[in-house]
Amino acid sequence: MILLTIENSKDFMGKFLVTDVFDGFELQEAVITTSVSYTISGRIHPEFFSDEERASRTNEFISWKEIRPVIFEMIKGRNTPLSFRFTLSLNSAAMNGLIKKESPEGPSEALRALVMTVRFENGAFFIVTGSSYETFVFEREEEKIWDRYLPAFLAKAGIDVTVQQ
């Protein structure tokens, strides 16, 4: 787990809410505080969809690409939100591809998600990395891979961050 400080908040928010930079992620949860607080669970309710639509949906959480316009509408305006927190996980295909590329053994069967939490509070932006396992895992090699990968991913997208030690 690492903490990243986002250096240019305006640039980051533009890329986060308007472009496809983060479309390979899924929203697990969002908490947005403006004049009121909103909490959004990104967990998909399969019963909402037709049988045909349900068959084409294999993910547990909504893609950032699908929910991003809704979030944008909630945040835009002349007043800056008081705070927000978005917990995003790398989609399973990208997660498995990353781990297979970086580790000859491939992902642990216990690995559930590689996560980044984007936080805005007191005028500052942070990203915290993390991982989720179904059971206790002593060696968290996937988390180490994720901690190396995410700053490089952000740099490639032109997002300036500082890794906090």
Image (tube, grey):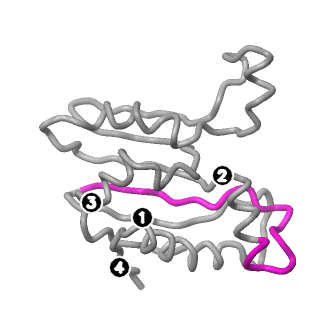
Q: Determine which residue is flagged by label 4.
A: 162
Q: Nearer the viewer, mark 3 or mark 4?
A: 3
Q: What secondary structure is found at the residue carrying circle 1? A: strand
Q: Residue furthest bottom?
A: 165
Q: Is residue 162 above or below residue 16?
A: below
Q: Position of residue 16 (x, y in %)?
A: 38, 52
Where does the magenta region start and end? 100-121
Label 4 amino acid?
A: Thr
Q: Residue at x 18, y 35 (%)?
A: 77
Q: Nearer the viewer, mark 4 or mark 2?
A: 2
Out of 57 and 44, give the one closest to the viewer. 57
Q: Are marks 1 and 3 in contact (CB under 8 Å)?
A: no
Q: Residue at x 37, y 56 (%)?
A: 119
Q: Position of residue 133 (x, y in %)?
A: 74, 60
Label 3 amino acid?
A: Asp
Mark 2 Cα shell of 10 Å, populated few (<14), some (14-19), many (≥20): many
Number of the label disc, if any, that sits on residue 91: 2
Residue 149 within the magenta-colored segment of the rendering: no
Marks 3 and 4, how far apart at CA: 15 Å
Marks 2 and 3, how far apart at CA: 24 Å
Q: Determine which residue is flagged by label 1.
A: 127
Q: Determine which residue is flagged by label 3.
A: 11
